[in-house]
Amino acid sequence: MFVHYLSALACIIFILSIGYCGALNLTFPGGASLSYQNGVLRINLPTGGRSEDTKALFDTIPPTGTPPPTALIQVKDTGTIKGYGAFAKSPLPRGSFLGFYEGDLVQSRQSLDRLIDRRVQEWSLNHDKVSTKKGSSAAMDYVMSLDGGMTFLDGYARAMDRNVFSPVHLNHADKGTPACNCVRFLEQKPLTDQKDGHGKWDSSNTVAFFTSRDIEENEELCFDYGSNFWKGRKKEKV
């Protein structure tokens, strides 16, 4: 498998060196893929290492657009520094589907930076300096990467609607702790071809959420945000 990766990388490096401006999509046994589009090289490694039980859970991801079980989960104030969170209104068995991450698609890091800057500026118009500093930190709280840092879902607007549950309302809990009772999976779609023959990154890549164990009534639902989320923000970690 590793030999396949090296050969593919060598091929891509050669093609880029001659000024190729199109798009490439290469797939390998085991689910790995390499793609190049608009000057961006994406490497998606296979999802090996999951147990058979977890793999079976991953394989049951519902069709894109399947709504979350809003009648079973309530968004309310946690009464802690975390603010609002999602709580089970009744017991949920392990493997319960919680919905897809909802948000606006942002197709480049530059676009995301502009979006966040604009959000912080709007926040500063209505808040003092202390609140603005907190708002600047929170501006990225609901952004989820779909491919390692070039395509994103911005769930900020959806998170502000606390009347109806969405996975954007899930708080953080460290993996391996009792409080971490949910898991997320990225459902990756392949590149598709446009009429002009150039490849197009499929924006329907979705992040699905499930319970990772049995959930009790009134228990808060949380998942691990990952180490990248907390870079430069360790003092804020709750």
Image (cartoon, rainbow, N blue to C red):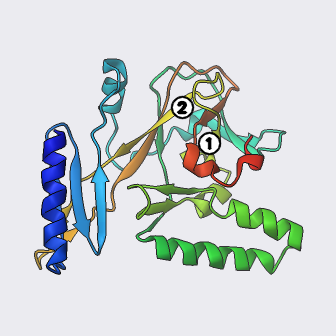
The reply to whether discs 2 and 1 touch (Cβ–Cβ < 8 Å) is yes
Tally the numbered discs. 2
Quarter occupied by residue 186: top left
- Secondary structure state at the residue bearing disc 2: strand
The vertical placement of 149 against 119, above or below, is above
The vertical placement of 43 against 18, above or below, is above
**Residue 235 relative to residue 44: left or right:** right
Quarter occupied by residue 161: bottom right
Viewport quadrant of the C terminus: top right
**Is residue 104 among the parts visible in the rendering?**
yes
**Residue 168 relative to residue 111: left or right:** right
**Residue 47 relative to residue 14: left or right:** right
* Horizontal and vertical percent position of residue 30: 19, 36
Q: Give whichever of 72, 236 is nearer the camera.
A: 236
Q: What whole-number distance in Å separates the C-alpha atoms at marks 2 and 1? A: 9 Å
* Horizontal and vertical percent position of residue 8: 14, 55
The vertical placement of 70 against 88, above or below, is below
- Secondary structure state at the residue bearing disc 1: loop
Q: Give whichever of 213, 198 is nearer the camera.
A: 198
Residue at horizontal 31 percent and vertical 68 percent from the top: 40
Residue at horizontal 16 percent and vertical 38 percent from the top: 1
Other residues around mark 1 within 10 Å, as few (<14) / some (14–19) / many (≥20): many
Residue at horizontal 41 percent and vertical 55 percent from the top: 148
Residue pointed to by mark 1: 170
* Horizontal and vertical percent position of residue 87: 67, 33
Residue pointed to by mark 2: 182
Mark closest to the chain's N terminus, 2 or 1: 1
The vertical placement of 73 against 127, above or below, is above
